[in-house]
Image (cartoon, rainbow, N blue to C red):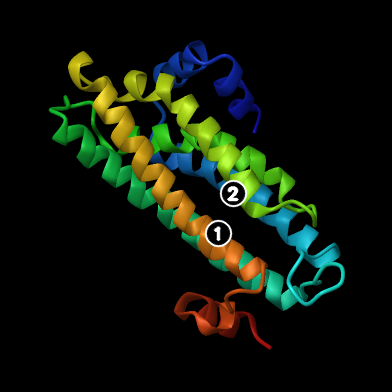
């Protein structure tokens, strides 16, 4: 989470240090992405269980049972992990479409997304509060992430200068749409507009957890 603040306020120099480290896929996954996701997942789950969220038909806030929290957070964790893995592949493909060099490896694309999306996960630290709309934390977080990636993509992927802006705009659009779709699905459940137990993924996860 501290790294997200450095990327937002320090920009280029923070990205330069990431490039110099040249971390592998497993290290970025285990040391950066998964801890960041686990922290936000646990905190949000605790907030849902303790304070709940506003839903139509409830005078105050709807409390979520332990099983509801476990099912929701497991589904959201899985969706976000798949989102980053798939989007990293799309970024790699976009880089090659824009006449990219050999630096368009999957590991570099994955690294750029993990660090680039860290401001979005940082804003999710506000999700445990009952009155906080999930759309607010997502919208501010994704805008900060897109702004952060402006310094990161050129450094990690090293595109040709003539294609750098096109690559940045294309990647930003993909991330905005993909993260927005996941946020919309999860927010619908929190607001009582979609039943997790009726979805394919949610139903299987709830069966695994038990009654």
On-image quarter of the C terminus: bottom right
Position of 95 compared to 6: left or right? left
Residue at x-position 80% and y-position 65%: 52
Position of 63 compared to 169: left or right? right
Lower sequence index among marks 2 and 1: 2
Number of the label disc, if any, that sits on residue 77: 1
The residue carrying pointer 2 sits among few (fewer than 14), some (14 to 19) or many (20 or more) residues within 10 Å by Cα, namely: some
Comparing 54 with 207, the one in front is 54
Number of the label disc, if any, that sits on residue 37: 2
Residue at x-position 40% and y-position 43%: 175
Up/down of 41 relative to 126, above or below: below
Residue 57 seen from this side: yes
Up/down of 120 relative to 12, above or below: below
Label 2's element? Answer: helix
Quadrant of the rendered image containing residue 49:
bottom right
Quadrant of the rendered image containing residue 108:
top left
Label 1's element? Answer: helix
Position of 153 compared to 200: left or right? left
């Amino acid at each position: 989470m501290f790294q997200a603040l450095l990327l937002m306020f320090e920009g280029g120099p923070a990205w330069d240090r990431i490039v110099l480290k040249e971390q592998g896929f497993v290290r970025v996954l285990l040391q950066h992405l998964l801890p960041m996701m686990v922290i936000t997942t646990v905190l949000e789950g605790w907030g849902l269980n303790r304070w709940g969220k506003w839903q139509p038909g409830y005078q105050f806030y709807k409390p979520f049972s332990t099983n509801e929290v476990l099912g929701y957070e497991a589904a959201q964790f899985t969706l976000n992990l798949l989102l980053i893995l798939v989007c990293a592949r799309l970024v790699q493909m976009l880089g090659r479409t824009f006449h990219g060099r050999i630096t368009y490896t999957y590991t570099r694309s994955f690294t750029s997304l993990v660090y680039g999306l860290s401001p979005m996960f940082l804003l999710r630290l506000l999700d445990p509060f009952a009155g906080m709309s999930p759309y607010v934390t997502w919208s501010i977080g994704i805008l900060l992430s897109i702004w952060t990636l402006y310094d990161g993509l050129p450094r990690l992927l090293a595109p040709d200068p003539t294609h750098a802006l096109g690559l940045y705009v294309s990647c930003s659009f993909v991330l905005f749409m993909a993260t927005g779709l996941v946020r919309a699905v999860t927010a619908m459940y929190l607001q009582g507009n979609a039943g997790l137990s009726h979805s394919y993924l949610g139903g299987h996860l709830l069966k695994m957890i038990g009654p």
